[in-house]
Image (tube, rainbow, N blue to C red):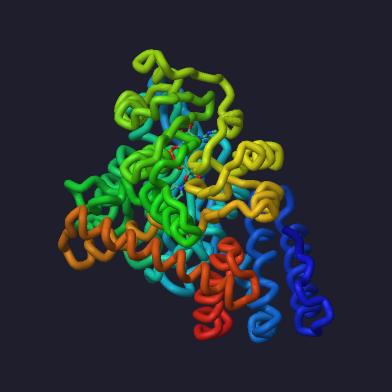
Amino acid sequence: MSFVPTLDTDNNSSKALRYIEDVYAQLVARNPQEPEFHQAVKEILASLLPILAAEPKYQNQAILERLVEPERMITFRVPWTDDTGKIRVNRGYRVQFNSAIGPYKGGLRFHPSVNASIIKFLGFEQIFKNALTGQHIGGGKGGADFDPKGKSEGEIMRFAQSFMTELQNFIGPDQDVPAGDIGVGAREIGYLFGQYKRIRGGYPAGVLTGKGILYGGSQARTEATGYGTVYFVSEMLKAKGLSVNGSRVVISGSGNVAIYAMQKAAQLGAKVVACSDSAGYVYDENGIQMDTVRRLKEVERKRISEYVKEHPQATYFPSSSQIWTIPCDIALPCATQNEIDEKMARTLIANGVKAVGEGANMPSTLEAIHLFQQAGILFAPAKAANAGGVAVSALEMAQNSMRLSWSFNEVDAKLQEIMGSIYRQSVDAAQQYGQPGNLLAGANIAGFKMVADAMLAEGVV
Ligand code: NDP
Ligand code: 2IT
């Protein structure tokens, strides 16, 4: 994972390499102290050398310089009153990164670690992911450094209402359409939608996705990211004559993405032996009971450690990062960024992992990805593998515009088709630009090409 050119004798290649290095150096200088944003940009840039060398128009039109600069970055105060009457203040964010192919689209994250770097890395990734879905959606992301843990229902609602009171100035069904991410699920989307509707009037269903089915949500949106990740991994395995069926799977996290990845993997005949939350992981050789996890996390909002009280054969370990020491055929990181570092990647490889599918955004460090690629491990990169969630969000927008609702099976069939198409686009672009089998390079190049060509068509804006 470096900027080393593949054809260093080629003049266009050396020019493209210098271009990439200059853009990256400027980015770091202009955005100091944003390591996650630097990492996300570096990962993309490292893949783009062949296409930039082949197509000098992108450099001539300053496409990279424009891509790495958000169209708009909004930060705002979110004051709210806690249950004791104390006034609290959080910081809200929305980055409207790129609207070349459609209205800004991307989730909202409520987590104490949220800052400008996290929001910009997520927004930047979203641009290319959204392009790969084949839907007309641009890239955006938002959130707040609010910690939902330990907050009452009333506090969550008041926070969400205050957050939306400011955010509503900047979003709309044709302008910018937020959804969920870490700490923002169906409950929070409900409160956010209620407040938007109250302020703006009418019934602007398409302003948010991930809504409840009763008020304009799409069937299968809840399941879409986790299911989509497993569909993508299945395609990747199938091409090598392998299958999810009969495999041993480890899935980090126990939130929205992890739960439905667990369900789909089990439906396809895998045994999921471990999952986690930020405090630790559970190991169940009989296979993790997804219904227990779902009830504990979605309904009771408890810690994953509670799982072993109901399943005494399982064991709890109070260190979430150690989940990757469990031997498995397929590893699905579905919790958060940089959860697989170099050391954990080495451990997974030594234990015989065959495939890694990124359900979370940027869960593997650049060093970990490099190790997986060197070891010939099948690697499904986040912006391709977890695109099912935002793809079904776009289908939710389409249903809202048409004022009709598709059945679960209809949406699920479209999701499978989209994940298959993202897989093929990634394979084809990797092949075309001289990196056969490298799905990371393929996904990055295919996503980049669509957005960059739309930017060229729209002129210098
Ligand atoms: P949830 O809030 O539903 O679940 C997050 C899970 O990850 C929880 O189990 C949480 O544990 C764990 N987690 C969060 N932060 C950390 C951390 N710093 N260290 C260890 N574990 C952590 O979020 P989602 O399932 O929606 O999101 C998971 C990942 O998937 C994120 O990277 C998100 O960006 C990505 N994603 C989500 C999509 C969606 O549609 N929701 C779509 C595409 C990607 P705890 O409860 O202890 O905090
Ligand atoms: O990272 C992601 O793609 C999401 N959190 C989902 C975004 C969306 O708009 O559905």
Image side of residue 153 versus residue 216, left or right: right
View extreme (right): residue: 9
Q: Residue at x 76, y 79 (%)?
A: 13
Give how far across and how far down residue 109 sits, in percent.
47, 44
**Residue 437: x and y, percent?**
58, 65
| Residue 382 location (% of width, % of height) | 52, 54
Is 461 drawn above or below residue 37 in the view shown?
Answer: below
Q: Determine the residue positioned at 69% across, 59% down.
A: 42
Query: Which residue sits at x=31%, y=43%?
Result: 267
**Residue 255 as seen in the image, left or right of residue 23:** left
Front in this rendered view, residue 313 or 163: 313
Pinpoint residue 22: horizontal percent, then vertical percent. 78, 69
Q: Residue at x 52, y 65 (%)?
A: 128
Going by the picture, which residue comes out furthest to the front? 241
Q: Is residue 88 left or right of residue 67?
A: left
Location of residue 23 with respect to 389 vertically, above or below = below
How many marks the image carries: the answer is: 0
**122 versus 81 height, above or below:** below
